[in-house]
Image: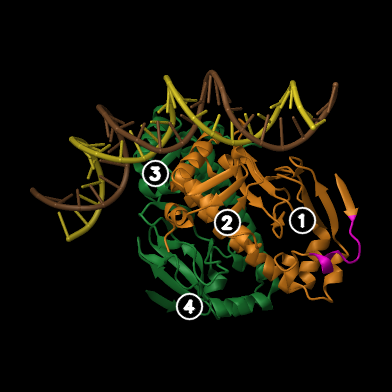
Chain colours: A green, B orange, C brown, D yellow
Amino acid sequence: MVVVRAPGSVCETCDIRETAICGVLNPDELPRLNAIVAAQNVAPQQAVFFEGDPADTLYNVTRGCVRLSKMLADGRRQVTGFLLPGDFLGLAYYESYAYTAEAVDAVRLCVFPREKFQALLTEFPQFERRLLSRASNELASAQDQLLLLGRKGAKEKLASFLLLLGRRARLRGTVDGALDLPMTRNDIADYIGLTTETVSRTFTKLVDEAVLELPSPQHVLIKRPEVLEDLAGEFH
Amino acid sequence: MVVVRAPGSVCETCDIRETAICGVLNPDELPRLNAIVAAQNVAPQQAVFFEGDPADTLYNVTRGCVRLSKMLADGRRQVTGFLLPGDFLGLAYYESYAYTAEAVDAVRLCVFPREKFQALLTEFPQFERRLLSRASNELASAQDQLLLLGRKGAKEKLASFLLLLGRRARLRGTVDGALDLPMTRNDIADYIGLTTETVSRTFTKLVDEAVLELPSPQHVLIKRPEVLEDLAGEFH
DNA sequence: CGGCCTGTTGATCTGTTTCAATTTGGGTGG
DNA sequence: CCACCCAAATTGAAACAGATCAACAGGCCG
């Protein structure tokens, strides 16, 4: 694990600062954060930490995609989330992490030692406020995912997943309708509670129905988003 | 909806104060909380609020069981949680609630107007700290539930559910192994992602295997908790 | 060039749902 | 107090979605 001390200007030039928690700090507070942060690169498929590890570090994803997962004793896996740049990682008010975090592709993280981070929380209340707001958004997303896993069929699950990725991609200014899937079919399957085969079959069904195009397995073009919305079936 | 102004001494005599968020306040801070709280009774099956309602109130459950749920457009329902006395309700940092909250049985709530509650948060930082810690515990539970919904079979799901209730009942000092189920089979089914019939069948299987006894549908005796633990399959 | 990992497709199998019929139990009114 | 009523729970039989098992294609890297 390579941890590099961050140069003094990292935060100022960080292009995801507004979307990350750091965004609540104003220019004269920023150096305080800068002082406790380090950068870390994680290679594809490498773990950031494992479920059960002592939770002594907090992270901010600045590049790449991080996969969160939990395992059953016999090896069945549930992916509980995918983190993208701007996402916060490591909020654990027990002493140990509740899930494993691994890099899907080449990942870069901002690393905060827990003690120092908590000191900053006390110093800057708006920081804690922001964190609570984050946590509560994550809770809402988790509940959407409960609905997906508990009550949706295969097609509905995949549709919801693609829309979710689409929404997040749009926030980060991608070409509308073009989606990049850094994760494998197996990762997707473990996220939406299916098998690789069913995910694959469902993709081909949606292609047959002209809802999607798949120039390559990791590149999706959403041709008829309204059909996906319909399938996702959210009540609004 | 009946909202009763609370008498001056409510909080002092509240028997769930230690387990609720209010527990972080010391005796001289308590009156400040008392000043903004009201009591509310909710009859069985009545809604506290609906998904989408403006989130202008926060609650603390002091008696009974509250069911949280989300619906799909066609009526399929996912129960996202059951709240018991001491549980906090209404943490929503959007303007509207992300789920519906309904009384399972006779429920009593402490009601906090959002504005006033937030003012208290600013005034007592340890209050906000506690809330963040709650949120992060809930997040951890939600992830357990994702694992359950996404990767467990019917028997494993029911086992996990009963163990969860058991753990919570033990915290509140019940006779070990005796469980009360205030919710219906249908509520359970919608919580663990099954149908009423499958829940019922799985109960009878567990009774046949002498893991449980069912003196009545709402009263469970756990005879062999180790079998349930085994079925739940948590990795520890 | 060859091997391997990922993805796709096909055939079969199984756990859970669905549909349908009973049974049980708690609450209500006579 | 008892009989009735209705919702909830249980049980059975049939259907189905998705899993499992298996084969094969394609791209990438050594």
Q: Position of residue A160 (x, y in %)?
A: 52, 40
Q: Position of residue C2 (x, y in %)?
A: 9, 50
Residue, disc 3: A219
Quote the CA–CA distance across marks 1 and 4: 41 Å
Q: Is residue A90 visible?
A: yes
Label 1 element class: strand
What amino acid type should be assigned to the residue bearing mark 3?
His
Quote the CA–CA distance across marks 2 and 4: 48 Å
Residue, disc 2: B166
Quote the CA–CA distance across marks 2 and 3: 46 Å
Label 2 element class: helix
Tell me which label, 1 or 2, sits earlier in the chain: 1
The mark tally for this picture is: 4
**Residues at discs 1 and 2 both on one chain:** yes
What amino acid type should be assigned to the residue bearing mark 2?
Gly
User: Is residue A10 placed above or below D28 in the rendered structure?
Assistant: below
Tell me which label, 4 or 3, sits earlier in the chain: 4
Between marks 1 and 2 in the image, the one whose residue lies nearer the viewer: 2
- In the image, taking residue B2 as reference, residue D6 lies left or right, namely left
Between marks 1 and 4 in the image, the one whose residue lies nearer the viewer: 1
Mark seen at residue A113:
none
Residue, disc 4: A6
Residue, disc 1: B58
Label 3 marks a residue whose chain is A
User: Is residue A1 placed above or below A213 in the rendered structure?
Assistant: below
What amino acid type should be assigned to the residue bearing mark 1?
Leu
Between marks 2 and 4 in the image, the one whose residue lies nearer the viewer: 2
Quote the CA–CA distance across marks 1 and 2: 27 Å
Quadrant location, the C terminus of chain B = bottom left
Residue B69: quadrant of the picture: top right
